[in-house]
Image (cartoon, grey):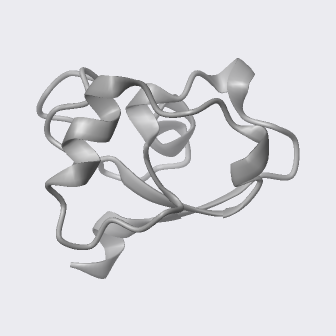
Amino acid sequence: MEIIKASGYDILATCGGKGLCATCHVQVVQGLNLLPLPNPNEMQTLDILYDAEPASRLACQLKTFQIPEGAIFKIKQDDY
């Protein structure tokens, strides 16, 4: 989520990065298989999203050191 904010996108992040609000919902376009698996809290939040897909993640649950070089993300918030 730090990378998204640093790029100038206005993300609400109303839960403060706890993985509860899903305002940082992203689709992993490239590099999904190189990311760690979602934690149970992230999975629970993704399960209630109507537009979640297998490549969905919550950016706040990914630490910058976990993101592989060349990974590409689409910010789902832009779809609304």
* Residue at point 50%, 44% (across, down): 4
From this viewpoint, which residue is outermost toward the right?
69
Picture coordinates of residue 13, whole percent (x, y)? 22, 36
**Image quarter of the C terminus:** bottom left
Q: Quadrant of residue 78?
A: bottom left
x%, y% of residue 22? 22, 46
| Of residues 15 and 57, the one drawn nearer to the viewer in this rendering | 57
- In the picture, measured across the screen, residue 70 lies left or right of residue 71, that is right
Query: Height in image: 48 above or below 80?
Result: above
Asked if 71 appears above or below 29 in the picture, the reply is: above
**Where's residue 19, x and y in %?**
26, 30
Q: Is residue 68 left or right of residue 11?
A: right
Q: Nearer the viewer, residue 2 or 43?
A: 43
User: Is residue 12 among what the camera can see?
Assistant: no
Residue 30: image location, x then y, percent:
75, 62
**In front of the other: 54 or 20:** 54
Dividing the picture into quadrants, the one containing residue 37 is top right
Q: Is residue 15 visible?
A: yes
Drawn side of residue 78 relative to residue 2, left or right: left
Q: Outermost residue toward the bottom?
A: 79
Residue under the image location 57 percent in, 37 percent down: 3
Number of labels in the image equals 0
Residue at image x 65%, y 24%?
64
